[in-house]
Amino acid sequence: MAALRLPMRTIREILRLRFGRRASIREIELSCKLARSTVGEYVARATVAKLGWPLPAELDDDAALNRLLFPDEHHPVALRPEPDWPSVYLPPTVSGAPSLELGAPR
């Protein structure tokens, strides 16, 4: 199950503290009452998106900032091809052991 996303107000506060005040991850964690890993994840996403503080005017809209921080959120994930199950499962072959076939009487 996917984790719930933080409110945009909290995300903006993380960005302000990190890039505006140069606060450490630990300081932000204590200030916002969040897990260190959560703060680190949002800071990493902002770094990948090349964000700083103050945010550009075009990111005043929450939806625009959301698209920038979570770019692959609304794209379908490519499905893995289904394995060729008959070739994946090969019955055990031990010499001298009776073979067990499905549906065969014992």
Image (cartoon, rainbow, N blue to C red):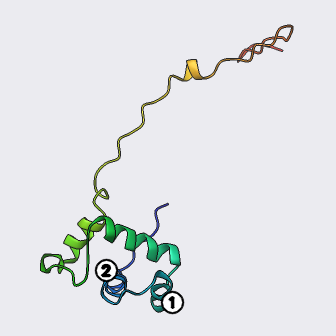
Vertical placement of residue 61 versus 97, above or below? below
Which of the two residues, 18 or 2, is positioned nearer the viewer here?
18
Q: Residue 3: x, y in percent?
A: 47, 67
Q: Which mark is residue 99?
A: none
On screen, residue 64 versus residue 19, left or right, reads left
Q: Which mark is residue 8?
A: 2
Q: Residues within 10 Å of mark 2 (few under 14, many from 20)?
A: few
Q: Amino acid at mark 2?
A: Met
Q: Amino acid at mark 1?
A: Leu
- Quadrant of image for the C terminus: top right
Residue lying furthest front in this view?
22
Residue named by callout 1: 30
Please, what secondary structure does the residue beneath circle 1 have? helix
- In this rendering, the answer to whether 77 lies above or below 64 is above
Mark 2 or mark 1: which comes first in sequence? 2
Residue at image point 30% right, 87% down: 20
Choose top left, top right, bottom left or bottom right for residue 18.
bottom left
Residue 91, compared with residue 2, is above or below; it is above
Q: Residues within 10 Å of mark 1 (few under 14, many from 20)?
A: few
C-beta proximity under 8 Å, tags 2 and 1: no
Nearer the observer: mark 2 or 1; the answer is: 1
List x then y, in percent, for residue 84.
50, 22
Name which residue lies at 26% across and 73% down.
Answer: 51
Q: Position of residue 63 (x, y in %)?
A: 21, 72
**Rounded to the nearest whole Å, what is the CA distance between mark 2 and mark 1?**
18 Å
- Residue at (39, 77) in percent of width and height: 6
- The front one of 9 and 48 is 48
Q: Is residue 20 left or right of residue 23?
A: left
Query: What is the number of callouts on the image?
Result: 2
